[in-house]
Image (cartoon, grey):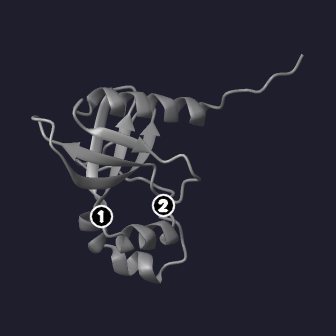
Amino acid sequence: MEFPKRTEEHIKESAGWRLLQAKTPTEWIIREITERDYGIDAYIEIVSLNGKVSGDLCSIQLKSSESIKWNENNAKLFGINKSTVNYWMSLPIPVFLIWVDIEASKIYFCAVKEQLRQLYSYYKDSTKKQ
């Protein structure tokens, strides 16, 4: 009898979400986006230790890898489309790329706009995936 199979990609994605939720302060609110993904997987609302919900939001794109290969304190993430970069750069709230190393149980993140400003002319003029 044939049944659906859970792909390795889906397993990694689920493991990444579990690790993100486990390592995020319990006061914070993670709002996963259930609509199709166009470069933003969730919004995180920062809540103070005393419970103040002030509307401070950031958006995140979550990537999960079995393990991250580092080269001289840097790692390169492939597969981000030019259109996604343009979308991130145009959003009015901060965007963070969160990269989960499942094997090491570690999460790395960067502010997308800050990092991409250095490479934006490449993305703006390129038709390639980075």
Q: Residue at x 9, y 35 (%)?
A: 50
Q: Nearer the viewer, mark 1 or mark 2?
A: 1
The answer, for residue 68, to whether it is visible in the render is no
Q: Which residue is mark 2?
A: 80
> In 3D space, how far apart are the residues under numbered discs 1 and 2 (Cα atoms)?
19 Å
Q: Which residue is mark 1?
A: 93
Q: Identify residue type, mark 2.
A: Ile
- Locate residue 67 relative to residue 113 in the image: left or right: right
Q: Identify residue type, mark 1.
A: Ile
Q: Residue furthest right?
A: 1
Image quarter where the N terminus lies is: top right
The image position of residue 121, as x and y in percent, is 36, 81
Q: Secondary structure at mark 1?
A: loop
Q: Residue at x 44, y 39 (%)?
A: 64
- Locate residue 70 relative to residue 130 in the image: left or right: left
The image position of residue 29, as x and y in percent, is 30, 39
Number of residues whose C-alpha sits closer than 10 Å to that of mark 2, classed few (under 14), some (14–19) or many (20 or more):
few
Q: Residue at x 42, y 45 (%)?
A: 62
Q: Quadrant of residue 67?
A: top left
- Locate residue 48 relative to residue 85 in the image: left or right: left
Q: Residue at x 33, y 73 (%)?
A: 119
